[in-house]
Amino acid sequence: MKKYVRKFWVGICVLLLLGGMTAMAAEDTILKGVKIGGVDVSGMTRSEAIKALESYEAQLGEKTLKLGIGDETVEASLSGFGIRFTNEEVVDEALGIGRTGNVVKRYKDQKDLQHSGKEFALSWSADQARVKAFVEENCTQFDREAENASLSRVNGKFEFVPGKQGLVLDVEGSVQTIMDYLENRWTEESTSEVIELKTKITEPEGSAEELAHVKDLLGTFTTSFSTSSSNRCKNLNSGAAHINGTVLYPGESFSTYEMVSPFTEANGYAMAGSYLNGEVVDSMGGGICQVSTTLYNAVLRAELEVTERSPHSMTVHYVELSEDAAIAGTYKDLKFVNSTQYPIYIEGLTTADKKITFNIYGKETRDSNRTISFESVTVSKIGGNTVLRESAGHPLGYKSSSKASVGYVAELYKVVKVNGVETERTKVNKSTYNGSDRVVTYGTAGDPVLAENLRAAIALQDEALADANIAGVVAAPEPPAEPVPEPAPEPAPEG
C-alpha cells in the first residue's frame, strides 16, 4: 500500500512541474537569474532584452581605450570606433535556458538558475573604417624622422652630435591590432591596459668614426655685399645661418630653396631689391641669390655634382658671368649631391665687413699636385642698340625713350692643372642674360605729310632725321587713356 502511495505523489509532482513549465513557456520571457554581458535580463522579452543590451552598448561607448605609440599615449572613445555587440543570437539562448531539452534537463537548468544564475558573454566588434580614420588623424602626428648624427663647429674645431631614432606608425598594422583586441581580448572591465600600436623604428645615419673623416677644406668661396642696404644684409645673414652646419652623407642631395625658405619675417627676412621682369623691385628675402651664388662657387671648387642651377635674368655685380646661381620661387633652385664617398659639412659665415663665405669640409682624396680654377668667357652681347618705333596713338611731336642695357651669352669653364700644366678644360655651364634695346617711340598722329616723312626716318632707323622732322612741332593733347587690362600673374622675383 505504501508503495502505491509513493508512486502517486511522484506522479502528482511531475504533473505539477510540467504544468508550471508549460505556463512559463507561454509567457516567452527570460527566466530569473539570467545575465548577458553583465546586464540582468530576467523577466524580459526578446525585444526588451535587445533594447537593454543596446543601452548597455551606448554606456560602454563612453569608455576609452588607451593606445601606445612609442613613448606617447592617445585615448580613444569606444563610441568613436563604432563599438557594437555582434552576437544578438545570445538573446535567444537566454530565452531557451530552462525551457529547452527534456524534462530532466529543464528541471536541472532551472535549479541551477535558482542557485547560481547564468551569464552569457557578449561578442564585440568595431567599424574598421572609423578605427583607421582615428589612427590616421590622431596617431600619425607622432611620426618623426630619424635625425642623423651631425657635427657642430666650435672655435674652428668639429664636435660630434649623436643622431636620434625615427619612428613611423604602421597604420594598417595598427588598425588590425585594435580590431583584434576589441574582437578577441577586450572585456567590459578592461580599463587600464595600453594597446601598443605597430611602429617602425628608423635608425639615424652616421657615427663618430664616420664623421671623424670630415676635417679637410674641399672648397671655399667669398663674395662681398659691402654696398648692400641693411635689409639686404639681414637677408644674407639669415640665408647663411640657415645653411650653416648642414651635414650631407654620401649620395644625399641638397636644395638651397628648401633650406633657406620660407621668406618671411618670422624666418629672419626683410624686404630688399631683387630682379623681376627686367627691373629691380623690393621683395621679401631680396638678396638671397647672393647666398646661393656664393654656395654654388664653393660647391664647384669642392667638385660636388651640381644637379640644378639657373642664371639670373640679368647680370649681377658680385661674381663673373656664369658664376651666379639664382633662386626664384620653386622654378629656379641650386641643387647638388654629395658625390664623394664621405660625409661633408657646409659652413656659412658672414662678417662685420659685409662678406659672405661658404666652406665645404670633408675628406680630401684629390691629388695634391692637381689644381682647379674657373674661367668666365663672354660668347656674345645682347641688346644695347637704339630702335625707333612709331605710335599712331600719340600725336606728332611726341617722343619717349627707354634705357638700354647690355645682355650677354657667357660660358664657364673648369680648368684642371697637374704640376702647373693644363690637362683638362671642361665647360661647366652656358648662361644667357637678358639685355634690352633703347626704344625710341615717336607719335605719328596728325599732319599726313609730316607723319609720312617721320615714318620714312623711322624706317631708316635714323634718330637724327626723325628728330629733325618733329622739330618745332608742338604735340597735341593726348586722348584719354584706355583702361589697362589686368596683368597676368608675374613670376617670383629672383633674389
Image (cartoon, rainbow, N blue to C red):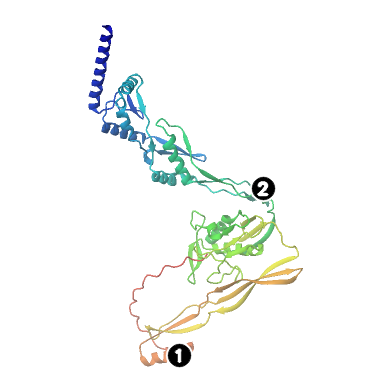
Percent x, y for residue 473?
A: 39, 88
Please tell me which of labels 1 and 2 falls first in the chain: 2
Percent x, y for residue 4?
A: 26, 10
Q: Secondary structure at mark 2?
A: helix
Q: Which amino acid type is shown beneath numbered disc 2?
A: Ala
**Front residue (pair 107, 133):** 107
Mark 1 or mark 2, whichever is nearer to me: 2
Image: 440 above or below 360:
below
> Is residue 439 at all visible to an observer of this figure?
yes
- Relative placement, left or right, of 305 versus 423 is left
Report which residue position mark 1 lands on: 457
**Front residue (pair 380, 225):** 380
Residue at point 57% right, 57% down?
Answer: 237
**Front residue (pair 458, 221):** 221
CB under 8 Å between discs 1 and 2: no
Q: How far is the residue under mark 1 from the one under mark 2?
A: 77 Å
Residue lying farthest top? Answer: 1
Q: Quadrant of residue 247?
A: bottom right
Location of the N terminus by quadrant is top left
Residue at point 64% right, 65% down?
Answer: 300
